[in-house]
């Protein structure tokens, strides 16, 4: 626990590579994403919850005090913890039944149109207590940690009423305090129009703008606001109204854009100056150019493309080549992307979107951290940063994406404390 007793001084030695991601205090753009600032045969000192020194083994060993605990990494690699910048981790039940139907030929949109999909999870989540939601989400928190993820962005969006959205956001706050995982919360009341508002959707938009946003802002329950901007979900105009209202409450903006169809969502993100535009499977060249000129970070989610058996991956290669500061995330959710695994995402990024292993590492650590306003705290191994890092059981960072279906994380530290130990 971050609030509990902190360890004092620990030295980590004998790392075949310390993949530091050290560099300028901003996200890596375009070609810069290949620069990982690796220290071969590296070592690191941690004091309490902070990184205090990083260097070659020789440099660090002369600074190890006699009472300092020493962890021998045994020639393994040390990386920052993954930062997963797009997840939906608080929900009740699963949708394994729909998964089976989709395998049989039904599409995600068909299932949603008959009241399944997001709505099915909303029904179960509304029926659950906050304690039940937390018990479920703690299980997923363990999955994130054992996969080497130490920070996640966490969206609401399976409540779709004032009380149920508050319940989810309060659960996220308690999970942040009560687990080793760090949560950054996002309000996604505009995830779907609930059935009781289908005949009067304008009233639901008003509920979001006039009641949910002010209350959430007052209780400081969300740093960001997101909208699922998509054909048959929320239109560009509705997304513009909701996100503009969220901005007036001081929230940062994110948007689900161009996921299942082209709606000009990337252009809307650029117009509004959102922090991120997420998904982007159908975004065209003009949309990519618009993101670039507005400085919006694209967040691509290949796990959802894979799990929906689609072939249409976002044009992530073109986005990097256009100079964008790309982010990779899992989109962990019970429908379109039931995986918490950043390693799975790294594999998909290389095999399906032609990202180099180095680009994928930048996209899932430092760039993701900046996209959440946490670039000064996490996402790299640098003096002064929070000691969120992972020793992976391989000797070259490229093996993380190359050996797939393997849980490489060997020891995971959050704020200087051991949060997962594969040897235990
Ligand atoms: O990011 N696109 C909308 N929301 C999620 C899916 C949520 C669900 O199916 O439960 C997504 O893919
Ligand atoms: Fe999503």
Image (spheres, rainbow, N blue to C red):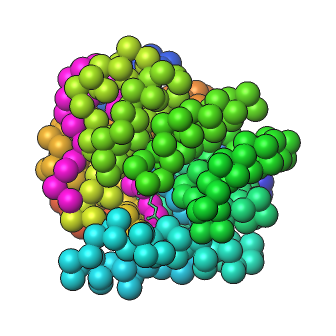
Of 303 and 395, the residue lying toward us: 303
When the figure is inspected, residue 41 is found, relative to residue 407, above or below; the finding is above
Kindly indicate the quadrant of the structure image that contains residue 280.
Answer: top left
| Along the viewing direction, whichever of 409 and 340 lies nearer the viewer | 340
The residue at the point 63 percent across, 38 percent down is 242
The question of residue 202 being in magenta is answered with no
| Residue 144 % position (x, y) | 48, 62
Give the total number of marks visible in the rendering.
Answer: 0
Where's residue 421, x and y in %?
A: 48, 66
> Is 328 inside the magenta-drawn segment?
yes
Instruction: Answer with the quadrant where ligand 1 appears in the image.
Output: bottom left
Looking at the magenta stretch, what is its main secondary structure? loop
Could you tell me which residue is drawn at 40 percent across and 41 percent down? 257
Note whether residue 228 is visible: yes
Kindly identify the residue that appears in the image at 31 percent across and 27 percent down.
287
Residue at 68% across / 74% down in the picture? 126
Magenta part of the chain: 310-334
Residue 189 horizontal side relative to residue 86, left or right: right
Q: Nearer the viewer, residue 56 or 22?
A: 22
The residue most toward the front is 199
**Does 124 appear above or below 406?**
below
Residue 416: percent from left, percent from top: 60, 48
Above or below, 251 against 107 in this view is above
* Res. 76 in view: no
Of 247 and 224, nearer the camera is 247
Q: Which quadrant of the figure contains the N terminus?
A: bottom right
Quadrant of res 49? top right
Q: Position of residue 369 (x, y in %)?
A: 50, 36
């Amino acid at each position: 626990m971050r609030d509990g007793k902190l360890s004092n001084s620990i030295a980590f030695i004998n790392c075949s590579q310390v993949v530091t991601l050290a560099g300028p205090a901003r996200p890596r753009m375009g070609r810069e994403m290949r620069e990982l600032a690796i220290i071969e045969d590296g070592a690191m000192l941690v004091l309490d919850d902070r990184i205090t020194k990083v260097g070659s083994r020789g440099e660090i060993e002369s600074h190890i005090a006699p009472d300092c605990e020493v962890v021998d990494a045994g020639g393994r690699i040390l990386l920052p913890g993954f930062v997963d910048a797009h997840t939906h981790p608080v929900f009740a039940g699963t949708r394994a039944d729909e998964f089976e139907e989709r395998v049989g030929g039904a599409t995600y949109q068909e299932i949603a149109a008959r009241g399944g999909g997001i709505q099915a999870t909303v029904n179960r989540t509304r029926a659950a207590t906050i304690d039940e939601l937390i018990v479920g989400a703690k299980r997923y928190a363990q999955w994130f940690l054992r996969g080497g993820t130490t920070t996640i962005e966490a969206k609401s969006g399976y409540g779709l009423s004032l009380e149920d959205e508050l319940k989810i956001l309060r659960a996220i706050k308690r999970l942040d305090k009560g687990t080793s995982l760090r949560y950054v919360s996002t309000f996604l009341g505009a995830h779907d129009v609930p059935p009781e508002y289908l005949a009067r959707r304008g009233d639901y938009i008003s509920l979001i703008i006039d009641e949910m946003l002010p209350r959430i802002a007052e209780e400081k329950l969300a740093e960001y606001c997101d909208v699922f901007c998509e054909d048959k979900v929320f239109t560009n105009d509705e997304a513009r109204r909701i996100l503009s209202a969220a901005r007036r409450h001081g929230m940062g903006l994110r948007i689900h854009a161009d996921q299942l169809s082209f709606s000009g969502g990337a252009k809307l993100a650029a117009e509004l100056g959102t922090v991120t535009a997420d998904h982007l499977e159908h975004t065209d060249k003009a949309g990519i150019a618009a993101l670039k000129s507005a400085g919006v970070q694209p967040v691509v989610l290949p796990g959802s493309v894979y799990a929906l058996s689609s072939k249409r991956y976002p044009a992530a290669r073109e986005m990097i080549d256009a100079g964008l500061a790309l982010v990779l995330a899992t989109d962990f959710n019970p429908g379109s992307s039931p995986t918490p695994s950043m390693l799975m995402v790294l594999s998909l990024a290389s095999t399906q979107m032609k990202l180099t292993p180095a680009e994928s590492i930048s996209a899932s650590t430092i760039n993701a951290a900046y996209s959440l306003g946490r670039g000064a705290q996490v996402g790299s191994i640098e003096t002064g940063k929070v000691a969120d890092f992972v020793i992976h059981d391989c000797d070259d960072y490229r093996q993380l994406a190359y050996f797939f279906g393997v849980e490489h994380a060997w020891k995971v530290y959050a704020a200087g404390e051991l949060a997962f130990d594969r040897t235990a």
